[in-house]
Image: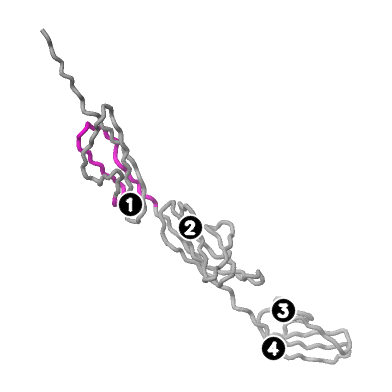
């Protein structure tokens, strides 16, 4: 806070004696950057005439506040992560990610704003730094942090490539995850019959998506090559 004092009348020069909450505080005419309290001044002019003011109360406004929370405390590697900053609409929150450069976000009309981090592959911690009002007039530091933990993707294997004869049953089974989903209508670890109606080898790529206990997914692929059924031409021998 501040008090701007103007002394008139009497005989200059003036001497000033301020008190804060009844205790001697300053001999300056004007007071700046003063804490909350009751301030009174005694002014003595050049003829030693004295005037004592009534107390003036300086009040400190309530500190601005902000908080942060992770939308999802854990995220699979490579996906987006989000933090929610909450506070007073219009206030500007300064924050840092993993100790990096400060960044700002403005609290929306609903009292919050979402900070999105794209394609994250390592743990992310958002740390609050300060809050400033909409006019950038007042600001104060704030504390608080929240962390998003990264879950590694499973190492999924579709197995080794296979080469089989036409009509032979093939079984494909994924590994490295908890559950598996194949393309081309294949069921994990269930035999299916191959078919090649051409006269040349045909290779089909089958892709499996494996999901682990954390819900994280990864893929792998395997090639199955079908050799055609050989044909035999009958040869007639003439004597």
Q: Is 168 contained in the magenta span?
A: yes
- Residue 106 shown left or right of residue 30 in the figure: left
Whole-Å distance between the Cαs marked 3 and 1? 63 Å
Q: Nearer the viewer, mark 4 or mark 2?
A: 2
Image quadrant assignment for residue 164 = top left
Residue pushed farthest left?
Answer: 239
Q: Residue 173, position in %: x, y?
A: 26, 44
The local secondary structure at tag 3 comes to loop
* Residue 69 vertical placement versus 157 (above, below): below
The residue tagged 1 is 211
The local secondary structure at tag 1 comes to strand
Image quadrant holding the C terminus, namely top left
Q: Nearer the viewer, mark 4 or mark 3?
A: 3
* Residue 178 vertical placement versus 25 (above, below): above
Q: Residue at x 21, y 45 (%)?
A: 190
On residue 2, which mark appears? 3
The residue tagged 4 is 22
On residue 124, which mark appears? 2
Image quadrant holding the N terminus, namely bottom right
- Residue 122 shown left or right of residue 18 in the figure: left
The one nearer the camera, 25 or 216, is: 216
Which one is earlier in the sequence, the residue at label 2 or at label 1? 2
The local secondary structure at tag 2 comes to strand
């Amino acid at each position: 806070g501040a008090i701007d004092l103007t002394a008139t009348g009497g005989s200059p020069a003036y001497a000033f004696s301020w008190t804060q909450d009844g205790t001697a505080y300053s001999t300056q005419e004007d007071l700046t950057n003063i804490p909350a309290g009751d301030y009174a001044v005694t002014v003595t002019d050049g003829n030693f005439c004295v005037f004592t003011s009534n107390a003036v109360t300086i009040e400190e406004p309530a500190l601005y506040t902000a908080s942060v929370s992770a939308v999802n405390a854990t995220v699979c590697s490579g996906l987006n992560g989000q933090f929610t900053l909450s506070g007073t609409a219009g206030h500007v929150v300064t924050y840092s990610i993993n100790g990096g450069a400060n960044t700002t976000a403005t609290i929306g009309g609903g009292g919050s704003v979402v900070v999105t981090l794209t394609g994250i592959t390592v743990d992310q911690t958002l740390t609050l730094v300060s809050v400033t009002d909409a006019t950038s007039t007042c600001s104060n530091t704030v504390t608080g942090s929240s962390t998003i933990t990264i879950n590694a993707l499973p190492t999924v294997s579709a197995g080794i490539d296979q080469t089989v004869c036409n009509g032979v049953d093939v079984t494909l089974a994924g590994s490295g995850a908890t559950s598996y989903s194949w393309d081309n209508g294949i069921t994990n670890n269930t035999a299916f019959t191959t078919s090649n109606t051409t006269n040349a080898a045909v290779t089909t790529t089958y892709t499996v998506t494996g999901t682990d206990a954390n819900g994280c997914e990864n893929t792998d692929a395997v090639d199955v090559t079908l050799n055609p059924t050989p044909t035999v031409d009958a040869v007639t021998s003439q004597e």
